[in-house]
Image: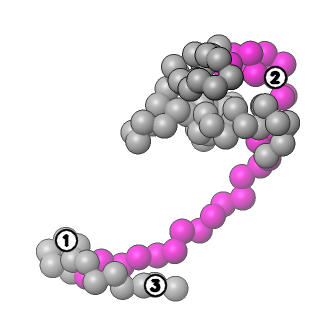
């Protein structure tokens, strides 16, 4: 399905929007826990504060400024998703 956006693209052509096709990504928790040192390496990149303070990410940030971490050969995963998964042991 193709949607016309009405925006002009190169050389005055009409822009075309194609819906994003979501790929199935494997569950995050098994990939995090397959290496017993991975959680401690992750938390080593977090500047921990008190329970009501912000815990800034000190590792890699993507072009939008969000923390990201590469797991194995897979794409980078946002740091907040990894922190939630490790903290609550769920996805």
Residue lying furthest left:
11
Residue at image mark 2: 35
Q: Report the residue marked by disc 1.
A: 10
Ranked by sequence position, the earlier of labels 2 and 1 is 1
**Which element carries disc 3, helix, strand or loop?**
loop
The residue sitting at 65% across, 17% down in the picture is 50
Q: CA distance from mark 1 to mark 3?
A: 18 Å
Residue at image position (48%, 37%) is 66
| Residue depicted at 84% across the width and 28% down the height | 34
In the picture of the structure, the residue carrying the numbered disc 3 is 2
Bin the neighbour count of mark 1 within 10 Å (Cα to Cα): few under 14, some 14-19, many 20 and up: few
C-beta proximity under 8 Å, tags 2 and 3: no
Q: Nearer the viewer, residue 30 or 39?
A: 39
In the drawing, what numbered circle is on residue 75? Answer: none
Residue 56 drawn at (x, y percent):
53, 24
Query: How many other residues sit within 10 Å of disc 3, few (<14), some (14-19) or many (≥20)?
Result: few
32 and 64: which is toward the camera: 64
Q: Are marks 2 and 1 in contact (CB under 8 Å)?
A: no
Q: Which residues are magenta?
A: 14-43
**In this picture, is 56 found above or below 23?**
above
Q: Quadrant of residue 77?
A: top right
Query: Is 2 situated above or below 89?
Result: below
Q: Would residue 16 be visible to someone looking at this image?
A: yes
Picture coordinates of residue 20, whole percent (x, y) = 54, 68
Give left or right: position of 31 versus 13: right
């Amino acid at each position: 399905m193709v949607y016309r956006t009405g925006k002009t693209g190169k050389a005055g052509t009409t822009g075309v929007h194609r819906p994003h096709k979501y790929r199935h990504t494997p569950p995050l928790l098994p990939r995090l826990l397959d290496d017993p040192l991975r959680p401690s390496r992750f938390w080593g990149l977090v500047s921990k504060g008190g329970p009501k303070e912000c815990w800034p990410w000190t590792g890699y940030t993507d072009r939008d400024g969000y923390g990201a971490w590469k797991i194995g050969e897979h794409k980078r995963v946002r740091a907040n998703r990894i922190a939630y998964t490790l903290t609550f042991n769920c996805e």
